[in-house]
Image: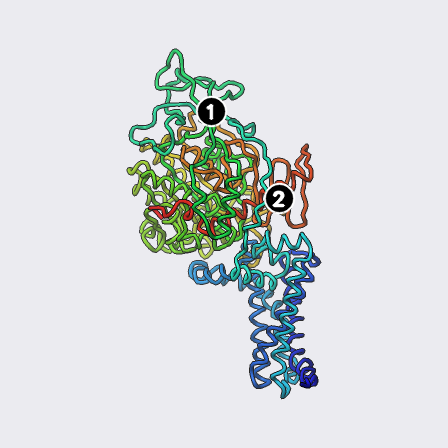
Amino acid sequence: MRVDTRLYRESLLTFLLPPALTLFLSMLYLELLLRLSSSLPLIHDGLPAELLCSLAFSCGFAALSTLPRKPSGARLVCLLLLELVTVWYLIAYFTDDSYGVFMSPMMIARETGNVMKDFGGSVAAAVLNGLGVILLYHVPVLIALFLPKRRFAAPATLKAALPLALVLTVLSAAGAWGLSNCTPQLRTEYRQRYTYDNAVRNFGLLSALHQELSHQLFPRDVSFSFQPVYETPAPTATPASTEGPAPTETPAPTETPAPTEAPASTETPLPTETPASAKTPAPAETPAASEVPALTETPVPTPEATPVPSGPNIMELDFSRIEKPDQAVSLSQYIQSRTPTEKNRYTGMFRGKNLILITAESFAKELIDPELTPTLYRMANKGIVFEDFYQPAWGGSTSTGEYSWLTGLAPTDPLTMMLSHDKNLYFTMGNQLQRLGYASHAYHNGSYDYYNRDTTHKNLGYSSYIGVGNGLEEGLTAGEFPHSDKEMIEFTLPQYIDEQPFSVYYMTISGHPAYAFSSESNDMAMKNRDVAEDLPHSFAVNAYIACNLELEYAMESLLRSLEEAGIADDTVIALVPDHYPYGLSPGSAWGSGVDGLGELFGYAPDTPWKRDHNAAIIWCGALEKLDEPIRVSGPVSSLDILPTLSNLFGLDYDSRLLAGNDVFSGAERLVFWNDCSWVTEKGTYSAHGDVFTPAEGQETDKDYLERIHADVRNKINLSWTIEYCDYYRLLFGDDDYT
């Protein structure tokens, strides 16, 4: 059969080439503009794949423009597709400009309604402040509008154009995939380190869309991605990097029954109020727990040594019950090869006590000041002191920050928390304590259903959850945004203070951007303006401090109420930030051209570890009875808080099933980001550029770097498999409370 090549030649030259070339050049322009505006390198390893992926999209869109039967229709389709691409690039620009991350299509699709409802003013401000940018991104559309219409005229042989366009699309897409996997580094970025944000930065926006679609349709198979387990330093009962007095034994409060999950022999509660004559001065060096005399209500002639709990934090589990899917089977094999963390002198120190967890919106360590925020300063310096803490920016703003420390798992998708609403989150403190009979409640002084919290937060282990819209608004001043953390605490505390032991979770909001002394921008900044507006900072930073003072006043009220009720010694408060204060970053969204973040920090936050270095607080009134605080040096992240609390409460948990570690166990310290960058005591590693910088006085070798790389990938894959496969349900069955 004779093929009329003339038809295909005419289709290519007169029908496909004009729209395809127009779209291709437009996409190159938009990609260049996005990389310039986001401070991304123009020349990078993924550039060839980025170009071919742009060509694939161009040919695919050109194929769609063949569908109308009239030239005017083809031209209209081409313009609409170009506008669609332009809008998507603008969305990418504004999300990165606002939050420092490129958010996935699913995240944007699911949260657009909530964003417009709760933050419509911020969106409008971003659009108004970014009109120049919007116009710049629309240059290709404006040019296409004035191109001669005859360039879009279709030949009579329209049928030949569509298959030709599809062939070109498939070939370009295949070429882009091949180039994305042509080197070990690119293959690692494309597969093992995939997140939507990383994909945009490494391969371009259109390639990221392709990768996201691929990962949604064909979830990554991690069955073969767990690396061999390397030998790590053996845990010690008393890690050298943890300083402070050992806990000592006193009777537990009679009104707070001790859980029966762990053996009584491991109980080492904190000291209660002891007469001055009975207190033992702290020695110059902290002795082992077995050498510390037990403090009692009255002096005793021969105090007995407090036994140090020993043995690994593991559970008797039947991994053989998991026979599918393959990812879960692979994870089971990996878990059984992991070295568990050890019980230690701090195990059970908080057994039977009340627990209040607080995720602090946009909190930063620089807010802690002895004069401006004396209560936060007291809590941060008279409890367990974390000297090198990080809350990584996981790519989903507040939601992923919450998930990381409440579950002890790395959020591998911006939607991880929302997708967990029907999963078994077995090891959250809420679920662990609820199984022991604790009264449990969760609160948020923002919209109750934002990020689907109305479904996710009960699943975290709280029998009741209220926010603005389902009850909490009754205790807040109407019309304010953000709402008052202090009002939330004072309204909700009476609901549980007499239900001991209790387990409570707060998600605050007073520190939310935008930061300006304006009732249209931030009512909390206006409320506390007199205290902060004359501080030696820019208006934006002063406004940030002002609105966060509401958290200080909330903690002041909370501690005072606990002390008045006589339960401060029996109540533990853990406070962790959700993310760095991105609202201080310069950009259109927040209406600021000033780097308020660098101003607040006092240094340029130009690496993940500089940007995300923060503070975490674990406080209990009984800790203030110690002669000196318990200090934790070395890098610690939000992932380590849950296993640390589980150990402190003496709970029956399996340390191999979490991505973080109990900081008192002696396990090797590791902080990592989901792009596989990391920090250890020996140095920092940036996945962007593949650069390791040793800490001062530290030496490493290739084997060490490879071991840490493998450990990071394993923990990310562990988190992903637990999230995706509902692994805890496969292992434990249905939880009565989930």
Mark 2 and mark 1: span between their CA atoms?
A: 34 Å
Report the disc number at residue 709: 2
Picture coordinates of residue 313 (x, y %)? 46, 34
What type is the residue that disc 1 sits on?
Answer: Ala
Picture coordinates of residue 335 (x, y %)? 51, 42
Residue 265 located left or right of residue 544 = left
Element under label 1? loop
Residue 99 located left or right of residue 491 = right
Which class describes the residues within 10 Å of circle 2: few (<14), some (14-19), or many (20+)?
Answer: some
Q: Which residue is mark 1?
A: 246
Q: What's the colour scheme?
A: rainbow
Picture coordinates of residue 7 (x, y %)? 67, 85
Of the pair 72 and 1, the residue shown nearer to us: 1
Element under label 2? helix
Which class describes the residues within 10 Å of circle 1: few (<14), some (14-19), or many (20+)?
Answer: many
Residue located at (45% from left, 61% from top):
110
- Pick whichever of labels 2 and 1 is earlier in the sequence: 1
What type is the residue that disc 2 sits on?
Answer: His
